[in-house]
Image (tube, rainbow, N blue to C red):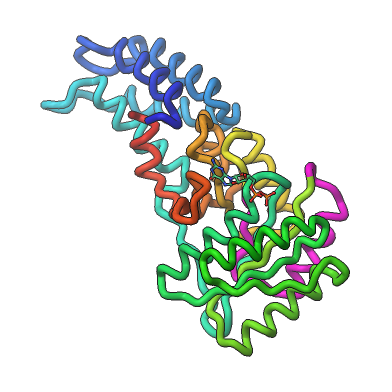
Amino acid sequence: AEMFGQLTTGLETAWNKLRGVDVLSKENIAEPMRDIRRALLEADVSLPVVRRFVQSVSDQAVGAGVIRGVRPDQQLVKIVHDDLVKLMGGEVSELVFAKSGPTVILLAGLQGVGKTTVCAKLAFYLKKLGKSCMLVAADVYRPAAIDQLKILGEKIDVPVYAEGVDVKPAEIAKHGLEEAKKKSINVVIVDTAGRLQIDKSMMDELKEVKQALNPTEVLLVVDAMTGQEAAALVTTFNIEIGITGAILTKLDGDSRGGAALSVKEVSGKPIKLVGRGERMEDLEPFYPDRMAGRVLG
Ligand code: GDP
């Protein structure tokens, strides 16, 4: 409950106002619904998402009637829970693997979001699923990023393909994929350059790398601390280069929840994995139902 602490507390205010009522009604949910709206906005959930969510929950609550053995406040909690799950995509969105040959996963993201760390974490995660992996260092603007990837690769015993900083990223990626094919590697994870902000050259380069690889997954790494801005980024990258999903990092920090709750609804693309720490073990699938459970405390 740490992560969404403030949101959880805000929602509790809503339930508490329904103690002692016999049945949910338009009148008695008005104030709790305002509390829910406020809590979501304070958690940095995107405004259109909040509006739709509150409308949907209100409609269901008013028509809920009396359920024997279930208090009205519990009924509202259940409605909110189920709508939160829906908001986050419902089911777990699994990684897709290529039917034949190596699966290529292209990772994109702005600088500092945890992309390089995610590359290694993802390889570590897939290794545990029995897949052999290779990391490809196509971030040619920061020599430190290549070194960092090599160090992480060594740590988890996964080969890292690099050609230094003088070769074009699309070329490095292509060569890396050829190498992986020769070695019958199952999954190739490609680290690309991040910038401080979106710019045209970054998008053009990503398009080139994507074209050279024909990847199975194109995942945008976003930082949970950036709230609804993360959802906007997923939208932009999807429009610009076409992505298959997002990876949300730093869920262990004091992020308020806006990113987790906004990405799917705003961008149409699912969050597939979440990072919740700096260790290699700290990457897991994004489970909408567990996440909703955490929001509700
Ligand atoms: P990049 O610039 O996107 O490649 O980011 P890095 O992978 O270098 O990560 C930037 C910083 O964020 C590093 O100090 C990482 O250890 C840290 N980091 C990455 N993922 C997480 C996470 O899930 N939780 C926390 N707390 N820190 C993370």
Q: Quadrant of the C terminus?
A: top left
Relative horizontal placement of residue 20, taking residue 100 as reference (left or right): left
Q: Is residue 228 visible?
A: yes
For image coordinates 50% across by 24% down, the residue present is: 40
Relative horizontal placement of residue 179, taking residue 155 as reference (left or right): right
Front residue of 17 and 251: 251
**Residue 65: x, y in percent?**
23, 24
Q: Quadrant of residue 59?
A: top left
For image coordinates 48% across by 44% down, the residue present is: 276
**Residue 141: x, y in percent?**
83, 57
For image coordinates 36% across by 14% down, the residue present is: 13
**Residue 158: x, y in percent?**
55, 72
**Residue 84: x, y in percent?**
41, 36
Q: Which residues are magenta?
A: 196-221
Q: Say if 35 sits above or below 233 in the image.
A: above
Q: Quadrant of residue 230?
A: top right
